[in-house]
Image: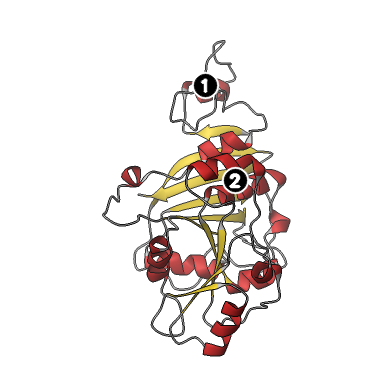
């Protein structure tokens, strides 16, 4: 893997076919790793530094209460497909999955739509020995919780996501959700959180509810409909997008669907990595 952006003296030297001076390294703040522009495998610690969540002051949102930061992690082909045959794994790569695991290890909670839980066969997040010390130092549990966004609670509560999670699974639903389904969820040990006045979930209210429960480092892995709702509500702070060097054609979904926004949201590029033709970008709201 090599860094393409931010541009540094080392980046420019390699782009022009030259080499940096002996002992040269990237300046502080360029992603955290000496020689980060070199085409080599990055350690998990280097990836964690490159994808660290901003402190509340750096986010520009210092308030008296908990300050959430919602980041999305998605993958797309060159022609805009977020899935192939209903799943994202066929358009991913080994490095994409390492970044996927790193982003999970940095998060307090992973927010995911019910349809994605069903299609992707979601399992509980697992404890990673490599991240045990940093998570403990940050006041986090051994693994992120999985928070499922669902209006109907049409979920298989016999799955490991509900029967054997390392930390209790969260369910975000509306006040009008069926009481028997809420009771079935709670019977498994899942924590049900009401984040909407009707049958559905209000995206902004869901983010606030998670923050008030102590989960401020938020990660969503979609699916496209859920991500589209976060975008339309204006609560998405960051997008980590892997661009896969593949063409699939067909009618696969884009990374975000659902309602459109009146004015397109503008994000700025803050980091771009590359390996084997895959681009790993990181955008933040402008």
Instruction: Tell me how the rendering is colored.
Output: secondary structure
Reading the image, the residue beneath label 2 is 102
* Rendered location of residue 48, percent (x, y): 55, 40
Q: Nearer the viewer, residue 73 or 165?
A: 165
- Judged from the image, the secondary structure of the residue bearing numbered disc 1 is helix
* Rendered location of residue 171, percent (x, y): 53, 72
Q: Residues within 10 Å of mark 1 (few under 14, many from 20)?
A: many
Q: Is residue 86 visible?
A: no
Q: Quarter of the image for the N terminus: give it.
A: top right
- Judged from the image, the secondary structure of the residue bearing numbered disc 2 is helix
Residue at x-position 52% and y-position 15%: 24
Q: Is residue 283 visible?
A: yes
In the displayed structure, would residue 277 be above or below residue 100? Answer: above
- Locate residue 179 relative to residue 286 in the image: left or right: right
Q: Nearer the viewer, residue 44 or 192?
A: 192
Q: Residue extending furthest left?
A: 64
Residue at x-position 42% and y-position 75%: 195
* Rendered location of residue 77, percent (x, y): 63, 55
- Locate residue 115 relative to residue 215 in the image: left or right: right
Which one is earlier in the sequence, the residue at label 2 or at label 1?
1
Q: Which mark is residue 121?
A: none
Q: Given contact means CB atoms under 8 Å apart, are the residues at marks 2 and 1 in contact?
A: no
- Locate residue 28 relative to residue 65 in the image: left or right: right
Reading the image, the residue beneath label 1 is 10
* Rendered location of residue 73, percent (x, y): 55, 54
Distance, label 2 to label 1, CA atoms, is 25 Å
Residue at x-position 52% and y-position 52%: 107
Dividing the picture into quadrants, the one containing residue 95 is top right
């Amino acid at each position: 893997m090599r860094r393409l952006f931010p541009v540094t003296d080392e980046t420019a030297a390699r782009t022009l076919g030259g080499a940096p001076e002996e002992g040269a390294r990237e300046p502080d703040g360029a992603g955290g790793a000496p020689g980060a522009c070199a085409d080599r495998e990055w350690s998990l610690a280097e990836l964690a530094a490159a994808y660290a969540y901003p402190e509340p002051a750096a986010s520009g949102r210092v308030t008296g209460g908990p300050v959430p930061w919602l980041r999305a992690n998605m993958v797309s082909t060159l022609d805009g497909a977020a899935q192939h045959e209903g799943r994202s794994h066929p358009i991913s790569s080994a490095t994409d999955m390492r970044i996927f695991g790193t982003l999970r290890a940095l998060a307090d909670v992973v927010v995911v739509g019910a349809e994605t839980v069903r299609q992707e066969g979601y399992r509980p997040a697992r404890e990673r020995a490599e991240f045990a010390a940093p998570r403990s130092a940050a006041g986090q549990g051994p693994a992120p919780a999985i928070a499922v966004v669902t209006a109907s609670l049409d979920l298989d509560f016999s799955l490991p996501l509900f029967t054997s999670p390392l930390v209790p699974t969260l369910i975000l639903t509306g006040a009008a959700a069926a009481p028997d389904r809420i009771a079935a969820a709670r019977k498994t040990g899942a924590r049900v959180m009401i984040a909407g006045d009707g049958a559905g979930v209000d995206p902004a209210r869901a983010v606030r509810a998670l923050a008030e429960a102590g989960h401020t480092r938020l990660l969503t892995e979609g699916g496209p409909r859920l991500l589209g709702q976060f975008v339309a509500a204006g609560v998405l702070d960051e997008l980590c997008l892997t661009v896969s060097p593949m063409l699939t054609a067909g009618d696969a979904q884009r990374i975000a669907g659902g309602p459109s926004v009146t004015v397109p949201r503008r994000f700025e590029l803050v980091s771009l990595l590359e390996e084997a033709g895959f681009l790993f970008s990181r955008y933040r709201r402008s």
